[in-house]
Amino acid sequence: MERFLFYSSLFVVLLMALSLYRAIAGPTPLDRILGGNAIGTKTTVLIIFIGIIFQRVDMFVDIALSYAMLNFIAVIAASRYFHKKGREADFY
């Protein structure tokens, strides 16, 4: 089981690296927002894996849910910011 969690975590970190590339080099602000959201989602999965490793899933699920809600709020805020910024650029 420990080996499975290790390789699963390694795979998730690899996917996070690909999402980081999309967040940095994305041609549009939407690509950057989606890359950041994907990183946050994968971080939530890693927090759950850590909870399984330490055998304290109940505590780490609460932390993961809090982090997921914070990630959701950050994505909404960034989306609204870029949406308003885009409208102002069209106005001038």
Image (cartoon, rainbow, N blue to C red):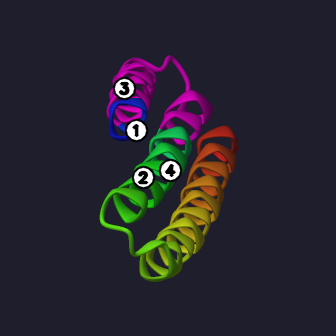
Circle 2 crowding by C-alpha within 10 Å: few under 14, some 14–19, many from 20: some
Q: Is residue 84 left or right of residue 12?
A: right
The quadrant where residue 7 appears: top left
Kind of element beneath mark 2:
helix
Circle 4 residue: 45
Position of 84 relative to 92 (above/below) = below
Kind of element beneath mark 1:
helix
User: Reading the chain from its start, which is encountered first: label 4 or label 1?
Assistant: 1
Kind of element beneath mark 3:
helix
Circle 3 crowding by C-alpha within 10 Å: few under 14, some 14–19, many from 20: few
Q: Are marks 3 and 1 in contact (CB under 8 Å)?
A: yes
Circle 1 crowding by C-alpha within 10 Å: few under 14, some 14–19, many from 20: some
Q: Quadrant of the N terminus?
A: top left
Residue type marked 4 = Val
The magenta region covers 6-35
Depth check: give the residue in front, 88 or 30.
30
Kind of element beneath mark 4:
helix
Q: Is residue 7 left or right of residue 45?
A: left
Count of numbered labels shown in the rendering: 4
Circle 2 residue: 49
- The span from disc 4 to disc 2 (Cα, nearest Å) is 6 Å
Circle 3 residue: 7
Q: Position of residue 80 (x, y in %)?
A: 65, 60
Type of secondary structure dominating the magenta stretch: helix
Position of 32 relative to 18 (above/below) = below
- The span from disc 3 to disc 4 (Cα, nearest Å) is 13 Å
Residue type marked 1 = Leu
Q: Position of residue 64 (x, y in %)?
A: 49, 69
Position of 1 relative to 59 (above/below) = above
Q: Is residue 49 left or right of residue 65?
A: left
Residue type marked 3 = Tyr
- The span from disc 3 to disc 1 (Cα, nearest Å) is 6 Å
